[in-house]
């Protein structure tokens, strides 16, 4: 069965790269794009799946000028919103330009491996502390790439900032950790406060067994059961960092969505209503 989403559906997490003669791709390690994936390429994918709108998550390697994403938003304002990479010294004028173009959030990297940051690229928590009052004034939120145990540790300090939060990729909790882990359960409880949102995306990143990502299904179900009004969906297209053998099939990701969210009304909320509210479509 091929899945097609309802009119008005929003892909709340995807990336674009290039064309490289105008927007060179920087080094992101294994996440470096090796060929262009333009906004028009994304639209071609959406047309096959029934997706109408989307939120570009600006790629770390594309630089803190946000140029490739800004260009797409200026050309397709009705279809797109975006998440930026920022430096604390960004000017008020530039922040206003980004806001007017449709940027709604700043992307914060707080993911760790073996107790150390995975990347020093992008916008850090320390940057966020400086940026928070300025982006909050413009109605932005912070999108966090953070694992559930690190969120449990960081939540007190995060909640002192004047921001709401969107948690990437189901809190990037690897499937073998178990959806009953206290830190994952604490994350789903935070969604109920209304101050946190999350994306049911990244099953291909969180799995330990590969396609069709059945080991991630309990996590997705737990999130939706906890707070269906605070959940959006994203494809994470074009899935940079995968090999040819592990590259996701979008139909597998849509099948997982339908299996974990069998109620059509709840799916429409996640695909259409919640993104419209969060990103002001």
Image (cartoon, helix red, strand yellow):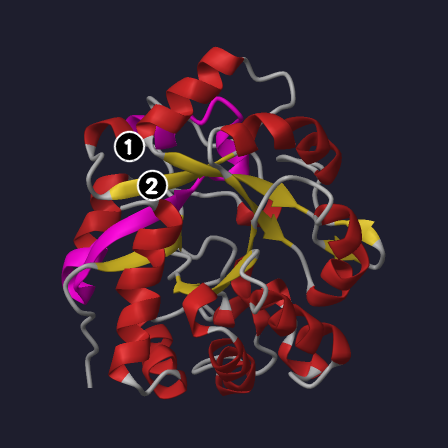
Foreground residue among 56 and 212: 56
In the rendered image, the vertical position of residue 60 relative to residue 260, given as above or below = above
Disc 1 is placed on an element classified as: helix
Residue 37: in magenta span: no
Q: Which residue position is annotated with label 1? A: 73
Instruction: Look at the image and give the residue range highlighted in magenta.
Output: 45-72
Query: Residue 104's spot in the image, x, y percent?
Result: 43, 38
Mark 2: few, some, or many residues within 10 Å (few <14, many ≥20)? many
Q: Determine contact: label 2, label 1, CB under 8 Å.
A: yes
Q: Secondary structure at mark 2?
A: strand
Crowding near the residue tagged with mark 1, few <14, some 14–19, many ≥20 C-alpha atoms within 10 Å: many
Q: Which residue is mark 2?
A: 81
**Residue 112 point in image, percent of width and height:** 75, 54
**Tag shown at residue 223:** none
Q: Is residue 174 left or right of residue 276?
A: right
The reply to whether residue 265 is in sight is yes
Hey, which quadrant is residue 255 in on the image? bottom left
Quadrant where the N terminus lies?
Answer: bottom left
User: In the picture provided, is 180 more to the left or to the right than 140?
Assistant: right
Residue drawn 33% across and 22% down?
Answer: 22
Q: Which residue is rendered at x = 32% and y = 43% of the image?
A: 37
Q: Nearer the viewer, residue 185 or 240?
A: 185
Residue at 33% in and 23% down: 21
User: As rendered, which of 173 and 197 lies closer to the eye?
Assistant: 197
Q: Earlier in the sequence, mark 2 or mark 1?
A: 1
Let me know if residue 53 is in the magenta part. Answer: yes
Residue 108 vertical position relative to residue 213 in the rendered view, above or below: above
Toward which corner of the image does residue 72 lie, by quadrant? top left
Decide: is 130 above or below 9. above
- Residue 275 lies, in percent from the top left, at 34, 56
Kindly report the distance in space between the C-alpha atoms of the residues bearing marks 2 and 1: 7 Å
Res 36 seen here = no
């Amino acid at each position: 069965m091929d899945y097609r989403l309802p009119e008005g559906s929003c892909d709340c997490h995807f990336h674009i790269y290039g064309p490289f003669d105008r927007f060179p791709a920087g080094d992101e390690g294994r996440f470096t794009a090796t060929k262009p994936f333009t906004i028009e390429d994304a639209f071609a994918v959406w047309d096959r799946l029934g997706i109408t709108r989307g939120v570009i998550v600006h790629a770390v390697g594309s630089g803190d000028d946000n140029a490739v994403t800004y260009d797409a938003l200026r050309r397709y304002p009705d279809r797109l919103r975006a998440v930026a990479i920022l430096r604390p010294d960004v000017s008020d004028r530039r922040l206003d330009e980004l806001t007017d173009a449709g940027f709604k959030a700043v992307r914060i990297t707080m993911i760790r491996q073996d107790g150390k940051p995975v990347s020093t690229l992008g916008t850090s928590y320390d940057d966020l502390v400086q940026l928070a009052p300025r982006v909050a004034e413009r109605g932005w939120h912070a999108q966090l790439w953070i694992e559930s145990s690190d969120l449990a540790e960081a939540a007190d300090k995060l909640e002192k900032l004047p921001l709401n939060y969107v948690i990437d990729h189901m809190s990037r909790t690897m499937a073998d950790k178990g959806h009953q882990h206290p830190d994952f359960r604490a994350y789903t409880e935070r969604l109920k406060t209304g101050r946190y949102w999350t994306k049911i995306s990244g099953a291909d990143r969180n799995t330990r067994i590969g396609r069709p990502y059945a080991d991630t299904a309990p996590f997705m179900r737990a999130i939706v059961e906890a707070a269906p009004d605070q959940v959006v969906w994203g494809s994470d297209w074009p899935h940079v960092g995968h090999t040819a053998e592990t590259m996701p099939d979008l139909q597998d990701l849509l099948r997982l969505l339908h299996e974990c969210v069998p109620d059509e009304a709840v799916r429409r909320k996640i695909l259409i209503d919640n993104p419209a509210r969060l990103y002001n479509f």
